Image (tube, rainbow, N blue to C red):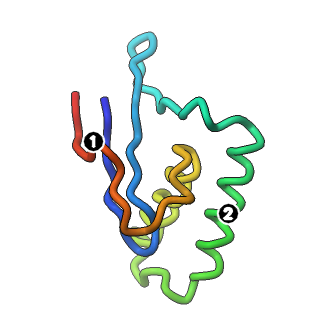
């Protein structure tokens, strides 16, 4: 299954792929993301989020969504995409 999170609040669009393993859906992290790349992506994404804290939404749920978007971008290696870029296959498939 593939889910697409559109670009928003300075975060890039993210395509998240999920695989069913043993009856459980798990995020399929790209092969390009090893431990070092994940650390780099998370550090870059969270630093950007911190730098822009003046623009965080006032509603806590919206701020939580923005933070989750940031982490998902790091996990899927979308952190270096421009904020307006759309990933290929931007639909929800089952």
- In screen coordinates, is 34 left or right of 4? right
Which residue is situated farthest in the bottom direction here?
54
Residue 51, percent from left and from top: 64, 81
Quarter the C terminus occupies: top left
- In screen coordinates, is 7 left or right of 45? left
Residue located 31% across and 48% down the image: 4
Place residue 61 in its image quadrant. Answer: bottom left
Quarter the N terminus occupies: top left
Q: Badge 1: how crowded within 10 Å, few (<14), some, or many (20+)? A: few
Residue located 54% across and 33% down the image: 30
Residue located 41% across and 74% down the image: 9
Q: Which residue is mark 2?
A: 44
Residue 13, percent from left and from top: 38, 57
Q: Nearer the viewer, residue 8 or 25?
A: 8
Is the C-beta separation of discs 2 and 1 under 8 Å? no
Residue 6, percent from left and from top: 32, 59
| Secondary-structure class at tag 2 | helix
| Secondary-structure class at tag 1 | loop
In the rendered view, tell whether residue 63 sits above or below residue 27: below
Residue located 62% across and 63% down the image: 45
Q: Nearer the viewer, mark 2 or mark 1?
A: 1
Q: Badge 2: how crowded within 10 Å, few (<14), some, or many (20+)? A: some
- In screen coordinates, is 52 left or right of 22? right
Q: Which residue is mark 1?
A: 89
Q: Nearer the viewer, residue 89 or 53?
A: 89
Q: CA distance from mark 2 to mark 1?
A: 25 Å
Residue 74, percent from left and from top: 58, 51
In the rendered view, tell whether residue 22 sits above or below residue 86: above
Residue 43's disc number = none
Place residue 52 in its image quadrant. Answer: bottom right
In the rendered view, tell whether residue 74 sits above or below residue 31: below
């Amino acid at each position: 299954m593939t889910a697409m999170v559109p670009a928003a609040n300075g975060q890039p669009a993210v395509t998240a792929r999920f695989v069913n393993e043993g009856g459980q859906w798990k995020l399929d992290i790209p092969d390009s993301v090893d431990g070092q790349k994940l650390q780099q992506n998370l550090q870059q994404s969270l630093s950007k989020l911190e730098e822009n804290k003046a623009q965080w939404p006032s509603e806590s749920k919206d701020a939580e969504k923005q933070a989750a978007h940031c982490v998902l971008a790091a996990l899927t290696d979308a952190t270096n995409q421009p904020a307006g870029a759309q990933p290929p296959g931007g639909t929800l498939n089952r």
